[in-house]
Amino acid sequence: MPGQQILIVGESPRERVAYTEILENLGFEVTIALDGTAAQSAISKDNFEMILADFNTSHFSPIRFIQQVKAKSPATELLFVSASPHVADAVEAMKEGAADFIVKPLTPEQLKLCAKRIYSRKKDMAQARKRSVKKKKPVAIITRDPGMGRLLNLAERVADSSASVLIQGESGTGKELFARFIHEKSNRKNMPFVAVNCAALPEALLESELFGHEKGAFTGALARKLGKFELASNGTLFLDEITEMQFHLQAKLLRVLQEKTVDRVGGIEPVPVDVRVVATTNRDVKASLSKGEFREDLYYRLNTIPLTVPPLRDRLGDLPLLCKFFIEKYSILDARDVKGMTRAAFESLCRQRFAGNVRELENIIHRAVLLADNGMIEPRDLLVEEGEGPVDPGEKSPGFPYGLEPSPLKEMEEKMIFHTLDKTDGNRTHAAKILGISVRTLRNKLNEYKKTPAA
């Protein structure tokens, strides 16, 4: 606590002296403001860890004061006291971001508890942020497509707002990249960007991940845990695959977005949070609404700013740029001297349907960089089926890998494995990496082929 600054706002000399003595004994540095005018002057000069204010101080507008403090220093905690409190005042103050609202008299024990709790919470958040905030890399959205350009322009224009964003699009189109782009263009860019995959966790774990829990809240809760909302405080919370969230949790999420507070599992009081939410889905939201799988009120709350990322097949003009980007990226990462691809290889790519969109293209190029000879990617290095142009995901692409005739799946697998081993000069570790299997699986397959009689 040493060095932490606290501002006390109030007209009673006796209370100011008592509060100051308690807080200084705890190691805080205390500044005094006798009225609202002095408080305004104080916050214009300094940022405070905590502000303790009498709600009924003269020349003082508490709600406006909270807004000004939070705009300048979002991490500052505000604690209000009042001799004649009104429930409406307390509710409004808490909604705007006050940490607590206490009826006078404020006892020494209460003040110590509040100060220690606030200090402990800020310390926990600082430590958690160190673990969650990684070294940032610039977001690269590679495009020259006019539609994508308009989408990026819209994302940048709304980035500084606090409005929720819902990004829709097929899997692999780059929805998370758009979420990170919005964060980096916002005034929250120096605060955490915290991501949660709503489809990856069961309901009980997801609730704890999002909202946190107190020690002893359930079996195995051996210590208090801050949820992702608290870890993302003053930053951005990215909720991936939001339509996979269980219906019960959708209601809790809606309440957090409306009240700007979270209730930890096993907690006894709400915790204020200031978070910008960006959510994504690859499902048809309207269909989920009609089936009753997704809450309509939550949809409208999230869909304040709607963005729909187009599939790769609708912006094939980006293909040359994306190929160049991924070739350079993986040539550096894997220490390969690959300069580009032949016209035949590029034309082969142009005939693909790209059901997996940009993610699929990236995987194809990565594999091709590893397999390429003589510095250029050839059609055989792509290991893709020869299509006849982009087709709908429901259609079947004609052709077979690198000109092979139709044959049983097991024979196709065997030919693929030996082809890859040939390209890697028999290096099993390298071959397994290209094939996307473990070395152990590759070894078992090779042993299996030895036992199979030659045709």
Image (spheres, helix red, strand yellow):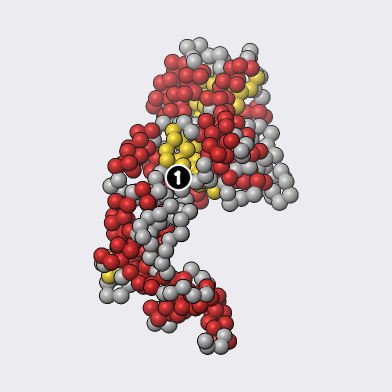
Q: Quick one: quadrant of the N terminus?
A: top right
Q: Is residue 97 above or below residue 144?
A: above
Q: Quadrant of residue 269?
A: top right
Q: Give the percent coordinates (x, y) of residue 230.
A: 55, 39
Residue under circle 1? 169
Q: Give the percent coordinates (x, y) of residue 433.
A: 46, 71
Give the side of residue 229 with respect to residue 246, left or right.
left
Q: Give the percent coordinates (x, y) of residue 183.
A: 41, 41
Give the side of residue 45 with respect to residue 446, left or right.
left
Nearer the observer, 3 or 379? 379
At label 1, counting other C-alpha atoms closer than 10 Å, the crowd grade (few under 14, some 14-19, many 20 or more) is: some
Say which residue appears at 55% left-offset and 39% top-offset: 287
Say which residue appears at 44% left-offset and 35% top-offset: 306
Please say whether residue 449 is visible from this viewpoint.
Answer: yes
Q: SS for tag 1?
A: loop
Which amino acid, by three-letter code, is at mark 1? Gly
